[in-house]
Amino acid sequence: MLSELHALSTLYNLDPLVLPEFRKARQLLPQGGNQELLKIINEFKPESLKELELVSGRKRSNLSRTLKTLSRYGIVELIKQERKVKPVVKATDFNVEFGLNTP
């Protein structure tokens, strides 16, 4: 990913100080497996991480880490119910806007 960012900075003549912000914005967007995970949560509406583990085929430790990150950005809400955590998708559509010509 760093080589990709370096190529972008060279191609678009970006200040290297902008790259961390670009990287952070890019991390906010669900990609690949995380997009699929959001679709699974939205479609199956699992009542717990254990249920999500079964329908997604991903390990609970991996799910927990990913969901905590998505939760920090407001993409997923983790609702604690007794001894379970229920994931709920809060954001389903994403628009990203970058302006290179803003002062």
Image: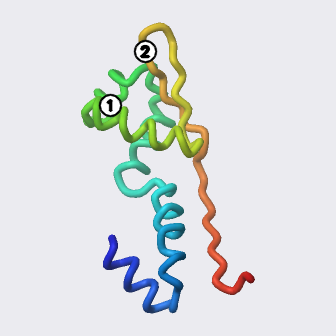
The crowding category of the residue bearing disc 1, from other C-alpha atoms within 10 Å (few below 14, some 14 to 19, many at least 20), is: some
Rendered image quadrant of residue 101: bottom right
Of 67 and 44, which appears nearest the observer? 67
Q: Which residue was labeled with disc 2?
A: 84
Q: Amino acid at mark 1?
A: Val
Above or below, comparing residue 87 to residue 102 in the picture: above
Q: Nearer the viewer, mark 2 or mark 1?
A: 2
Image location of residue 18, percent across then percent down: 54, 76
Q: Secondary structure at mark 1?
A: helix
Q: Amino acid at mark 2?
A: Lys
Instruction: State which quarter of the image contains the N terminus.
Output: bottom left
Q: Which residue is located at x 36 percent, y 37 percent?
A: 65
Q: Secondary structure at mark 2?
A: strand
Image location of residue 94, percent across then percent down: 60, 57
Q: Residue furthest top?
A: 82
Q: Which residue is located at x 51 percent, y 90 percent?
A: 12
Q: Which residue is located at x 25 percent, y 33 percent?
A: 59
Q: Which residue is located at x 31 percent, y 78 percent?
A: 3
Image location of residue 23, percent across then percent down: 46, 66
Q: Which residue was labeled with disc 1?
A: 55
Left or right placement of residue 90 versus residue 60 in this view: right
In terms of sequence position, does the residue under pointer 2 or pointer 1 come before the other?
Answer: 1
Image location of residue 7, percent across then percent down: 38, 85
Of 36 and 63, which appears nearest the observer? 63
The crowding category of the residue bearing disc 2, from other C-alpha atoms within 10 Å (few below 14, some 14 to 19, many at least 20), is: few
Mark drawn on residue 102 = none
Please say if the residues under marks 2 and 1 sit with CB atoms less than 8 Å apart: no
